[in-house]
Amino acid sequence: MADQTPGVPPADPESQITPPGGPERSASDRAAGMSVQAADMVDDLVANVHDRFIRPVVLGARAVVFGLLIAVLATTVLVLVSVSLVRLLTIYAFDGRVWASYLLLGGLFTAAGLILWAKRSSADPTAATNS
């Protein structure tokens, strides 16, 4: 007993645990190890499929939904601003002459459309010279 380190239990060869890959490994231990490996393989496969296929589809669907939402809201705001401008111009600027409000806003929208049309770019550089 003199060669024992204080705080360390005596070494009992029967109570020592054998490593998992040791020769005394039972069939149930091997089956449990194989099931863990199979579960890890399935988990890796699911994560791989999610990263390569499902995630891009979800991101694309979000982009489409948010793009449509923004387009609908922008159209609604444009219509409401146009109606408000026609009302304001008719009442305060043109003294009840609606045709003048329509003429002014129509001219502004036409000018904006022509400017945007002139700034458009074509994907095919030969398409601009052929038309």
Image (cartoon, rainbow, N blue to C red):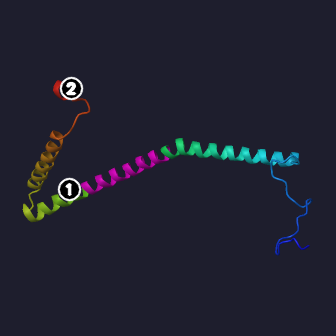
Q: Residue at x 21, y 37 (%)?
A: 121
Q: Quadrant of the N terminus?
A: bottom right
Q: Quadrant of the C terminus?
A: top left
Q: Secondary structure at mark 2?
A: helix
Of the two numbered discs 1 and 2 in the rendering, the one whose residue sits closer to the viewer: 2
Q: Residue at x 73, y 45 (%)?
A: 37
Q: Is residue 26 left or right of residue 123?
A: right
Q: Per the image, is 69 magenta?
A: yes
Residue 82, numbered label: 1
Q: Is residue 35 left or right of residue 94?
A: right
In the rendered image, the vertical position of residue 4 relative to residue 48, given as above or below: below
Amino acid on which disc 2 is placed = Thr
- Relative to the observer, which residue lies in front, 54 or 36? 36
Amino acid on which disc 1 is placed = Ser
Which SS type dominates the magenta stretch?
helix
Q: Which residues are magenta?
A: 57-78
Give percent across and percent down for residue 113.
17, 44
Give percent across and percent down for residue 107.
10, 48
Q: CA distance from mark 1 to mark 2?
A: 38 Å
Q: Residue at x 33, y 55 (%)?
A: 73
Q: Are marks 1 and 2 in contact (CB under 8 Å)?
A: no
- Relative to the observer, which residue lies in front, 99 or 118? 118
Q: Residue furthest top?
A: 130
Dividing the picture into quarters, in which one does residue 30 lie? Answer: top right
- Relative to the observer, which residue lies in front, 82 or 19? 19
Q: Secondary structure at mark 1?
A: helix
- Relative to the observer, which residue lies in front, 35 or 6? 6
Q: Residue at x 40, y 52 (%)?
A: 66
> How many residues crowd mark 2 within 10 Å: few (<14), some (14–19), many (20+)?
few
Residue 126, numbered label: 2
